[in-house]
Image (spheres, helix red, strand yellow):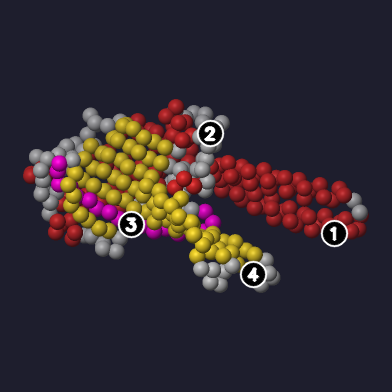
């Protein structure tokens, strides 16, 4: 994925609110939001992203089909040319090649408007699950970068030992894409933070016929951090907090923030994919479960 200009998706905004149009163009959401308005915005963005994803797949499949058809038609054209000596036999392969270029450009343009799926697969249903626990009189503070692994987030790029390959290149993108501050009805504050480390591994090898083949693999390491800050001085049942901890994927700690003792749970997930970045995201119920475990370990009487 590459950096997209602000107007990458221009012309496909019909029916979207001005807030959604701005978010689609910049691929960001920020500021303080009422829950209802934030949910409406994310619903619009989810619809856009689902339609855009379907269009990306369609353009890619048509591009591949045209490339295959072009190769076959060129062989047929050369064969026919040998008998008829007529250049008309090349009209079809030229036309199919032009269609392949058109669908390739369409695919590239749609990819530049793509949004990271995590906001609609994880965050949106998670907010829906905790909606009843939020203070309706206060706003939710949000910072989201929905662009995914673009060039501006590149952390490192290096050539790895080739081994049995001609060349191996590893590119890592650091993507702390979301922070959401949630005011709860009991006066507590919940903070959700999401980050992704994208690893792109490009390999080149020579096949048995001597041709150089390229292959790309992706690794998506997701981290979700849930922090709970009580409204006042509080104590924590650390034994209860750590009782259900999975040390392979999770870690917990107490921390001092905003003048109170809070608690934090962090969990990791890893997804893999080929050719394109993985579309999977952490399950919303597991992220909400981090908040529930924090809340159950807090001594609420001491927090009053």
For label 4, the residue is: 207
Residue 216 appears left or right of 34: right
Examine the image and state in which quarter residue 204 appears.
bottom right
Marks 1 and 4, the one that precedes in the sequence: 1
Task: Give the overall secondary structure of the magenta segment.
Answer: strand
- Please report contact status of discs 1 and 4: CB closer than 8 Å, yes or no: no
Q: Residue at x 39, y 58 (%)?
A: 270
Nearest the eye: 23 or 59: 23
Crowding around mark 4 (Cα neighbors within 10 Å: few <14, some 14 to 19, many 20+) is few
Q: Residue 184, how many percent across, how many down?
A: 21, 38
For label 2, the residue is: 7
The span shown in magenta is 259-276
Q: Residue 238, how many percent across, how many down?
A: 14, 56
Q: Residue at x 36, y 57 (%)?
A: 269
Instruction: Judge depth for marks 2 and 3 and give the one in front.
Output: 2
For label 3, the residue is: 268
Mark 3 falls on what kind of element? strand
Distance from the alpha carbon under mark 1 to that under mark 3: 57 Å
Nearest the eye: 156 or 82: 156
For label 1, the residue is: 79
Mark 4 falls on what kind of element? loop
Q: Residue 31, how many percent across, how many down?
A: 34, 32
């Amino acid at each position: 994925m590459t950096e997209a200009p602000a107007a990458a998706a221009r012309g496909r905004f019909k029916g979207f609110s001005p807030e959604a149009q701005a978010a689609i163009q910049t691929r960001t959401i920020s500021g303080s939001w009422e829950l209802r308005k934030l949910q409406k915005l994310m619903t619009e963005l989810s619809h856009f992203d689902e339609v855009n994803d379907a269009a990306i797949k369609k353009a890619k499949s048509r591009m591949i089909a045209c490339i295959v058809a072009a190769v076959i038609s060129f062989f047929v054209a050369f064969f026919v040319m040998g008998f008829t000596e007529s250049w008309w036999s090349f009209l079809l392969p030229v036309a199919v090649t032009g269609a392949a270029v058109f669908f390739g450009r369409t695919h590239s343009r749609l990819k530049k408007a793509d949004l990271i799926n995590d906001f609609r697969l994880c965050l949106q249903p998670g907010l829906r699950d905790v909606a009843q626990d939020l203070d309706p009189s206060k706003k939710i503070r949000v910072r989201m970068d929905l662009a995914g692994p673009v060039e501006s987030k590149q952390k490192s790029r290096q050539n790895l030992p080739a081994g049995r390959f001609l060349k191996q290149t590893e590119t890592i993108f650091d993507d702390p894409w979301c922070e959401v501050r949630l005011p709860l009805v009991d006066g507590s504050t919940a903070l959700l933070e999401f980050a992704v480390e994208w690893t792109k591994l490009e390999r080149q090898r020579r096949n048995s016929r001597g041709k150089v083949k390229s292959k790309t693999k992706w690794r998506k390491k997701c981290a979700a951090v849930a922090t709970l800050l009580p409204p006042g001085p509080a104590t924590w049942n650390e034994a209860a907090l750590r009782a259900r901890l999975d040390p392979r994927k999770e870690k917990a700690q107490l921390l001092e923030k905003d003048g109170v003792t809070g608690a934090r749970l962090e969990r990791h997930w890893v997804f893999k994919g080929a050719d394109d970045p993985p579309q999977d995201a952490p399950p919303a119920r597991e992220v909400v479960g981090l908040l529930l475990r924090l809340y159950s370990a807090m001594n609420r009487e001491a927090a009053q």
